[in-house]
Every structure is written in structure tokens, then in C-alpha cells.
Amino acid sequence: AQSVTQLDSQVPVFEEAPVELRCNYSSSVSVYLFWYVQYPNQGLQLLLKYLSGSTLVESINGFEAEFNKSQTSFHLRKPSVHISDTAEYFCAVSPRNTGFQKLVFGTGTRLLVSP
Amino acid sequence: DSGVTQTPKHLITATGQRVTLRCSPRSGDLSVYWYQQSLDQGLQFLIQYYNGEERAKGNILERFSAQQFPDLHSELNLSSLELGDSALYFCASSTTVDSPLHFGNGTRLTVT
């Protein structure tokens, strides 16, 4: 079985400051790793994913995440946040042998960006 | 807009009742997933259908059932509702079982 831990339930930050949202996972098999973002009153949107290859993956809106196998982590970072980044962010894993079928989500981290 | 349509957006009903939630996947997507998001349990995978057939099952209660129709839309049926069933129910779809999921905006169910 897999589990995902997002230790920070809420992260307040000022606009243009850097941010890191932490994600650690536990799994007895190899996994795919994902970050999803949920804006208010909307569904989840895929932000970025790690399937294989380079351990650093980037999204189109400036977020990046690095897969660290030894620390079983997949932290999300952004060097300078905007007000519009205010949302809930979910880390998720899926066993490689099930493809993307059985996503296991963390409890989410609410990013609050203030001016 | 993800292209996944869920209806209704909101549903308020009483304990013991039965409701049906509907999902239309993105055009061309064969796989449909149902997730439940509640305050105490977080996001939980319920069930997946692929081209009309059940493909994977998660933490779905026996009181809940789902199906995917020939036109690929899916319905999630919740019966003998309890207060604890109040949650946001998401549908997601993907092109194949190896493609990323695209989520709808959810149906918020309130059981009173």
C-alpha cells in the first residue's frame, strides 16, 4: 500500500516570496508522483508529474518539484509566488504497475499568498 | 475547463435517501474515475471504469454503486445515505489507463 504525507496543512507567504510545499511518500513498489492544484470551487488540475528520467520536473507556471528517491520526497517549489497561486495543493502517488489508476492523495496544503 | 462535466453541482438530501451523480468524460476519454473528498478522509479513490467495464475498486461502500454507459458517461449511485456521506464527489477521466487524469468540478452532496 501507498501513503502520502503533506506535513503542512497551511502555508502563508507574501507575494514574490519563495515557497516550498513538502511531500513525503511511502511505498513498497515504485511509484509515479504528481502534484495537483485545486482552486476554490473547482476540480483538481494536474500541475506536474514525475514518471521517469530527470528528477527535476517543471510546470508551465513556474513551479518545480524534485524527486528524491533516498528521502522518498517530492517537494514542490516556486521561487516567487503570485496572489493567483493561492489554492490547495495535493501531492499524489500511483503504483507503476497500475499506471495512473489508483492515485493516493495526501491531505493537501493550502497555500495562502498575501500582498 | 477540464472538459469533464459533472451534474448536479450541489445536492441536498435527507438521511436514508438515494441519489445519482452524473459524469460526462472529456471527448475521447474511455476511462472514468470517481473520487470522494471529505474533511476527515481527504481524497479517496472509489472506483474506475474503462470502456464500460469496471477496472479498479477502491474504498467504495457497498451502499454505493457505479456504472459506465455505452456513450461513456458514468453515474454514481449512493443509497441509504448517512450524514457521513456528505462530501465533494469528483469524477475524472483519462484517454487510457496510462494517461493523466482530468477532474471535473465535483458534486457537493449534503446529507441532512
Image (cartoon, coloured by chain):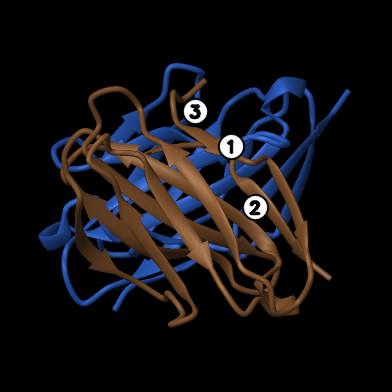
Mark 3 neighbour density, 10 Å: few (under 14) some (14–19) many (20 or more):
some
Residue highlighted by disc 3 = A63
Q: Colour of chain B?
A: brown
Are the residues under badges 3 and 2 in a single subunit?
A: yes
Which colour denotes chain A?
blue
Q: Name the residue beneath numbered marker 2.
A: A109
Q: Nearer the viewer, mark 2 or mark 1?
A: 1
The quadrant where residue B41 appears: bottom right
Tell which circle, 3 or 2, labels the residue nearer the N-terminal end: 3
The answer to which image quadrant residue A39 occupies is: top right
Q: Describe residue A64's horizontal placement relative to residue A51 as left or right.
A: right
Left or right of residue B5, residue B13 in this image:
right
Picture residue at 69% right of the left edge, 51% below the top: B108
Looking at the rendered structure, the secondary structure element under dot 2 is strand
**Same subunit: marks 2 and 1:** no
- Residue that mark 1 sits on: B105
Secondary structure under tag 3 reads loop
Near mark 1 (Cα within 10 A), the count class, few <14, some 14-19 or many ≥20, is: many
| In this rendering, position of residue A6 left or right of residue B54 | right
The quarter of the image holding the C terminus of chain B is bottom right
